[in-house]
Image (spheres, coloured by chain):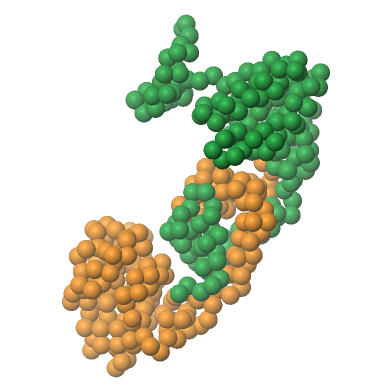
Chain colours: A orange, B green
Amino acid sequence: MVGPEIERLIQLLARLPGLGPRSARRAALALVKRRDGLLLPLADALTAVAESVRTCSVCGNYDTQDPCAVCRDVRRDGSLLCVVQDVSDLWALERTAAFRGRYQVLGGLLSALDGVGPEDLAVARLVERARSPDVTEVILALPATVDGQTTAHYIADALAECEVAVSGLAQGVPVGGELDYLDDGTLLAALNARRPV
Amino acid sequence: MVGPEIERLIQLLARLPGLGPRSARRAALALVKRRDGLLLPLADALTAVAESVRTCSVCGNYDTQDPCAVCRDVRRDGSLLCVVQDVSDLWALERTAAFRGRYQVLGGLLSALDGVGPEDLAVARLVERARSPDVTEVILALPATVDGQTTAHYIADALAECEVAVSGLAQGVPVGGELDYLDDGTLLAALNARRPV
Ligand SMILES: [Zn+2]
Ligand SMILES: [Zn+2]
């Protein structure tokens, strides 16, 4: 009824997290209504991101340059390495402006159920980086879920051969909570009160 | 921190209905992660819609052709004209497949608060169409809000000069709706409009 072009747009919008079929239809309408003010700028922004954004070969962050801005920043503390599940968690921590070290994005969590093993994650890459004499502490900023804690223990074991302290976020991260849904204050408190694993 | 390209994308996504700043960030990340599967197809879909979708010069609907598919469909009943606030309401009615007449999109509701007068809406266009001898009934499918009912009364007055019946949607309990979840106004209206079973 709405034509194949709009139907295709609704279907793609519905695949974004946070938008269901009904809200995708509303979003598509809002875009059609605001062709010059929103639809065309969004198309341009998507194309610009597609052309410019790359995965950082050092830490796994997304940026327009490789290495990313965090990895390039010489003022950051290279002795601290913060392990996050996903780029969204890296961004959430950066918004607190509380952490001045560097990151390693894992790309997921160990999960027997979903068949995710260590080889699917950047564990080997993390161990390689942690072997550097510059690195003195690895902070496991992983969610307080079963998979998150399983992954934290696995990584702590894998890092035993490296001469680094291994710490985790303090309690304060709600059980079952995803990091990037947390308010900045909770994240900040959990980071400052980090403890050895 | 995330670079100007991604920042711009997040800002534009946050202007879509249903997406706030936080969910826009999640959506942007999902797009970056799925560059070929989602980001580029969405950019293409937006461009296709921008290039092809127009406002129907007859009724105000959106379609790739002008007049729109509803206005072109000769099987539809030209004696019934359904007035809706917005294209989203037209689409909602079309999904029910219950109405086989034609539409007039108003483009909003009268609102003293927001300074929306009759000249801002397609009222004159509606009266012009209702003057056609083909049209026998105008159905005001407007929301049961103060602005919706003010607008319905204004339109009914404006149509007094035309030889058409003017009707409104029945008010009542939504099909499948639990009574104790309804607001008092709806319950009151449903009670006042009670009918013999
Ligand atoms: Zn990096
Ligand atoms: Zn039309």
Measuring 48% from the left and 9% from the top, which residue is drawn there? B195
Q: Position of residue B110 (x, y in %)?
A: 60, 33
Does A162 appear above or below A26?
Answer: below
Measuring 67% from the left and 38% from the top, which residue is drawn there? B120
The residue sitting at the right extreme is: B133
The residue sitting at the left extreme is: A196
Measuring 64% from the left and 35% from the top, which residue is drawn there? B117
In which quadrant is the N terminus of chain B drawn? Answer: bottom left
Q: Position of residue A39 (x, y in %)?
A: 64, 56
In terms of depth relative to the viewer, which is nearer, B144 or B44? Answer: B144
Q: Is residue A149 left or right of residue B153?
A: left
**Residue A151 shows in this picture:** no
The residue sitting at the bottom extreme is: A133
The residue sitting at the top extreme is: B196
Q: Quadrant of residue B125?
A: top right
**Residue B62 shows in this picture:** yes
Does B195 appear above or below B102?
Answer: above
Measuring 68% from the left and 49% from the top, which residue is drawn there? A5
Q: Is residue B18 left or right of residue A123?
A: right
Q: Quadrant of residue B39?
A: bottom right
Q: Position of residue B74 (x, y in %)?
A: 79, 28
Q: Position of residue B17 (x, y in %)?
A: 52, 49
Does B197 appear above or below B7?
Answer: above
Please tell me how many numbered marks the rendered image carries.
0
